[in-house]
């Protein structure tokens, strides 16, 4: 008796289609916002381009929203259920009654930690009566600059004038043409400014200051209703740190594409610094929350009595850490 195995190939093909269909059905599409086109937020770009979110069943669409306040509203409305942004904006929003919460943090160093000044200014006392530039009054660059001034014993708005100029490239141009006498910059921007002959008057990192910077922000409601999605996203970001540090060229190429920059030297400065500062274990720094509350408390009395723990939900990070997943990435 002869068997006729003519249905084997079609049957196998049908099985492949079924499995492919199931796998496709398991992929969750999600929009994720980010608030800055800077190397400090490049981890999420690299994680996406390396396929680390797809590896965890997520089809992530990245959306740039350059205002933290607008991005906060988008997260609340669930237009972008997850965002990479400064947790300070989330704290402000929660104090105003929202359920925004920080679910993880990629860094704990202040983004613009370097005070760069004009060529003739090499001592803090020389800043008296001068003009220092920020992107926007009330923005993170404004907060960090005021913190720097306090560290060197100067009173903002009294000893120095703080002027609203715009983005970092615009502020660097203002410094170059004399419109401003100084500004706070990121590491890679500082390195470029230093090569141009400007002075680095202070490095805030030397003071051990921790700040909220490039945090994973969502809502408590989204964590309750879609915790698995949040887990998958944080897992992709966590693996992203390992991938980022081990794949320099790939990561730099992604940074160049997202920042639309051909300045390889500046990109490399930023990459080298970021690769050392991204957190392997993405727990939100409590000192960073305390610092944010201190700053917000100058305008909002509710911040002075707030408990730092109320602004975070570390359950996803804790579960990931305790599972041994993070340790396994570095064996």
Image (tube, rainbow, N blue to C red):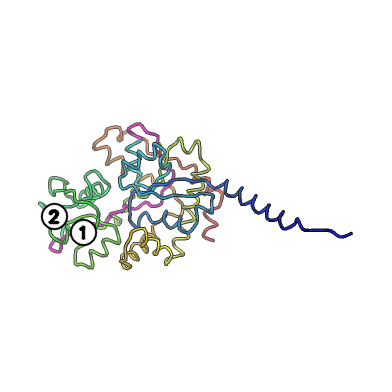
Local secondary structure at mark 2? helix
Residue 290 in which image quadrant: top left
* Picture residue at 31% right of the left edge, 48% below the top: 66
Local crowd size for mark 2, using a 10 Å CA cut-off: few (<14), some (14–19), many (≥20): many
Is residue 220 found left or right of 260 in the rendered image? right
Report the magenta residues as a range: 94-120
Q: Which residue is mark 2?
A: 127
In the displayed orientation, state which residue is furthest to the left. 129
Residue 5 — which label?
Answer: none
Local crowd size for mark 1, using a 10 Å CA cut-off: few (<14), some (14–19), many (≥20): many
Q: Position of residue 220 (x, y in %)?
A: 44, 36
Local secondary structure at mark 1? helix
Above or below, comparing residue 240 to residue 306 in the picture: below
* Picture residue at 36% right of the left edge, 58% below the top: 258
Q: Nearer the viewer, residue 209 or 22?
A: 22
Above or below, comparing residue 190 to residue 306 in the picture: below
Q: Position of residue 112 (x, y in %)?
A: 28, 54
Question: Is residue 314 covered in magenta?
Answer: no
Q: CA distance from mark 1 to mark 2?
A: 17 Å
Q: Which residue is mark 1?
A: 172
């Amino acid at each position: 008796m002869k068997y006729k195995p003519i249905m084997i190939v079609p049957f196998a093909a049908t099985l492949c289609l079924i499995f492919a269909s199931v796998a496709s059905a398991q992929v969750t599409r999600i929009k994720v916002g980010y608030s800055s086109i800077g190397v400090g937020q490049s981890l999420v770009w690299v994680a996406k381009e390396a396929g680390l979110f797809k590896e965890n069943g997520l089809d992530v669409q990245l959306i740039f929203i350059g205002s933290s306040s607008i991005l906060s509203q988008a997260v609340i409305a669930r237009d972008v259920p997850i965002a990479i942004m400064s947790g300070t904006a989330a704290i402000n929003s929660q104090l105003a009654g929202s359920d925004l919460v920080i679910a993880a943090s990629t860094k704990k160093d202040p983004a613009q930690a370097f005070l760069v000044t004009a060529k003739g200014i090499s001592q803090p006392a020389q800043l008296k009566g001068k003009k220092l530039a920020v992107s926007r009054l009330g923005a993170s660059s404004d907060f960090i600059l005021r913190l720097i001034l306090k560290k060197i014993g100067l009173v903002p708005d009294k000893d120095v004038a703080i002027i609203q100029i715009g983005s970092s490239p615009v502020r660097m141009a203002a410094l170059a043409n004399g419109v401003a006498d100084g500004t706070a910059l990121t590491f890679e921007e500082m390195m470029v400014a230093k090569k141009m002959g400007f002075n680095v008057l202070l490095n805030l990192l030397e003071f051990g200051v921790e700040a909220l910077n490039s945090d994973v922000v969502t809502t408590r409601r989204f964590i309750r209703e879609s915790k698995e999605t949040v887990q998958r996203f944080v897992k992709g970001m966590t693996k992203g740190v390992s991938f980022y540090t081990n794949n320099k060229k790939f990561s730099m190429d992604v940074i160049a594409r997202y920042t639309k920059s051909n300045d390889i030297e500046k990109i490399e400065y930023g990459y080298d610094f970021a690769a050392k500062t991204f957190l392997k274990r993405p727990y939100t720094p409590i000192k960073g929350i305390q610092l944010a509350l201190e700053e917000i408390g100058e305008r909002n009395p509710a911040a002075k009595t707030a408990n730092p723990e109320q602004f975070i939900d570390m359950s996803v990070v804790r579960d990931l850490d305790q599972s041994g997943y993070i340790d396994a990435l570095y064996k």
